[in-house]
Image (tube, grey):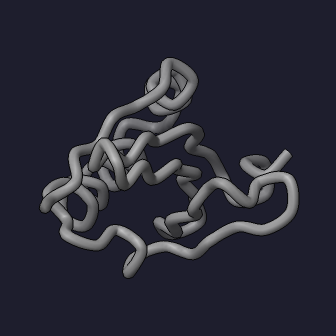
Amino acid sequence: MTYKVEYTKTAVKQLKKMDKKIAAFILSYIEDKLVNSSDPRVYGKSLQGNLGDKWRYRVGGYRMLAKIEDDKVVITIVEIGHRRDVYD
């Protein structure tokens, strides 16, 4: 069972606003680690509190917030941003 990755409109918009090199670095991380992964939780960390339903993936100084849906075998990238801004 391998997971596929989907993006929200917000995540796509945030990627387009980023520097091209940083966006390429983040996308290569997603391709290498998350696409067709059998266990995406190995690479991330579960969040707590009001973000408790999401997982965090660390890519340099940037963070990706994602929801993992085991019943659909899908990782939905919800938000992408610099670590100082993404949790607001």
Q: Position of residue 10 (x, y in %)?
A: 57, 23
Q: Is residue 55 above or below residue 76?
A: below
Q: Of 77 and 17, which appears nearest the observer?
A: 77
Residue 32 falls left or right of residue 19: left
**Please, which residue is most extreme toward the bottom here?**
42
Tell which of 83 and 38 is nearer to you.
38
Q: Residue at x 48, y 73 (%)?
A: 44
| Up/down of 19 relative to 16, above or below | below
Which residue is depicted at the point 34% across and 68% down? 40
Q: Give the quarter of the image for residue 79.
A: top right
Please tell me which residue lies in front, 64 or 6.
6
- Residue at 74 percent across and 60 percent down: it is 52
- What residue sits 57% from the left and 75% below the top? 45
Question: How far across and down, in percent of the image, does residue 41 sit?
Answer: 42, 73
Picture coordinates of residue 76, whole percent (x, y): 43, 40
> Split into 4 quadrants, where in the image is the N terminus?
bottom left
Q: Nearer the viewer, residue 65 or 46?
A: 46
Q: How many marks?
A: 0
Q: Quadrant of residue 61 in the image?
A: bottom right
The quarter of the image holding the C terminus is top right
